[in-house]
Image (tube, helix red, strand yellow):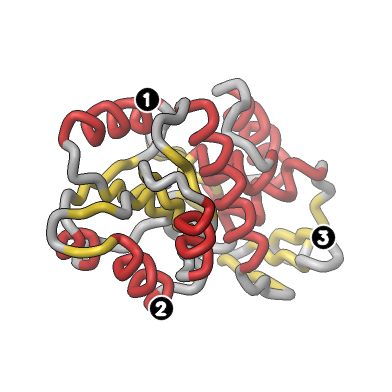
């Protein structure tokens, strides 16, 4: 899960980056509006509205126009009601006023990512190599043979199958299957182990140490 942190105060940015990294996020820091708009693609933006080279509201508008599904949370000292209203109207999904707790920010991040995930168009049928998933029917076949999965196993497989061949982080899987990242760390490993056994070939789901899992797409 990749987060772009747009914050011009180096002390604040360092503390937030460290806290987010401990929670398993990959964090890129941008200290200016220019750097924010030229940053690599990400899953969510934490956007300070007071930047040295431009207004964060303009950055928000530009990011939203570029990516309608991008999660954007304004994180700012501007706490007046009119500031909140303007921030939400120009494209922010949520608005957090400084000072705030990391527990609150974590909850807001998860909520925004859930909404972004649900808003994404869902394929009816996904085929990834030997695996075929009928999404509305919630059925799975491997080489044409039916595979009976639990609800969580199906949700994990679907999370991986949306991007076959790409590594999906544990946090992304947790959000897709549990709608939160506040789950015991071994939970994903246990369910993936069971899923591998039911698919009949452990090689279909590859582990990427320290990152997550990948469904073979060939």
Q: Which mark is residue 139?
A: 3
Mark 1: few/some/many CA within 10 Å (<14, 14-19, 20+): few
Image: 189 above or below 171: above
The reply to whether the C-beta atoms of the residues labelled 1 and 3 are less than 8 Å apart is: no
Q: Which mark is residue 65?
A: 2
Please provide percent x and percent y for residue 133. Answer: 72, 64
| Circle nearer the N terminus (3, 2) | 2
Q: Residue furthest bottom?
A: 65
| Quadrant in the rendering for residue 187 | top right
| Quadrant in the rendering for residue 126 | bottom right
Secondary element at tag 3: strand
Image: 200 above or below 102: below
> How far is disc 3 from disc 2 in space, using C-alphas?
36 Å
Q: Which mark is residue 40?
A: none
Please provide percent x and percent y for residue 214. Answer: 48, 49
Mark 2: few/some/many CA within 10 Å (<14, 14-19, 20+): few
Q: Going 46% across and 70% down the picture, which residue do you hit?
A: 90
Secondary element at tag 2: helix
Secondary element at tag 1: helix
Please provide percent x and percent y for residue 57. Answer: 35, 65
Please provide percent x and percent y for residue 88. Answer: 52, 62
Instruction: From the image, state whether disc 1 or disc 3 is nearer to you.
Output: 1
Q: Which mark is residue 22?
A: 1
> How far is disc 1 from disc 3 in space, using C-alphas?
36 Å
Instruction: From the image, state whether disc 3 or disc 2 is nearer to you.
Output: 2
Q: Going 82% across and 60% down the picture, which residue do you hit?
A: 139
> How far is disc 2 from disc 1 in space, using C-alphas?
31 Å
Mark 3: few/some/many CA within 10 Å (<14, 14-19, 20+): some
11 relative position to 65: left or right: left
81 relative position to 5: left or right: right
Is residue 153 in view? yes
Q: Going 55% across and 23% down the picture, which residue do you hit?
A: 185
């Amino acid at each position: 899960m990749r987060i772009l942190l747009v914050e011009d105060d180096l002390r604040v940015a360092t503390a937030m980056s460290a806290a987010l990294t401990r929670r398993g996020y990959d964090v890129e820091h941008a200290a200016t509006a220019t750097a924010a708009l030229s940053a690599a693609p990400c899953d969510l933006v934490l956007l300070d509205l007071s930047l040295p080279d431009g207004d964060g509201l303009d950055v928000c508008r530009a990011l939203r126009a570029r990516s309608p599904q991008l999660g954007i949370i304004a994180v700012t000292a501007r706490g007046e009601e009119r500031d909140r209203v303007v921030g939400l109207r120009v494209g922010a999904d949520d608005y957090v006023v400084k000072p705030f707790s990391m527990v609150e920010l974590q909850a807001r991040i998860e909520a925004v990512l859930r909404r972004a995930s649900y808003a994404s168009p869902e394929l009816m049928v996904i085929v990834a190599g030997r695996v075929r998933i009928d999404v509305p029917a919630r059925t799975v076949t491997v080489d044409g043979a039916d595979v009976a999965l639990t609800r969580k196993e199906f949700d994990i497989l679907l999370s991986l199958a949306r991007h076959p061949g790409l590594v999906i982080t544990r946090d992304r899987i947790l959000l897709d299957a549990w709608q939160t990242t506040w789950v015991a760390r071994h939970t994903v490993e246990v369910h993936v182990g069971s899923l591998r056994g039911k698919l009949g070939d452990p090689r279909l789901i590859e582990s990427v140490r320290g990152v997550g899992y990948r469904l073979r797409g060939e």
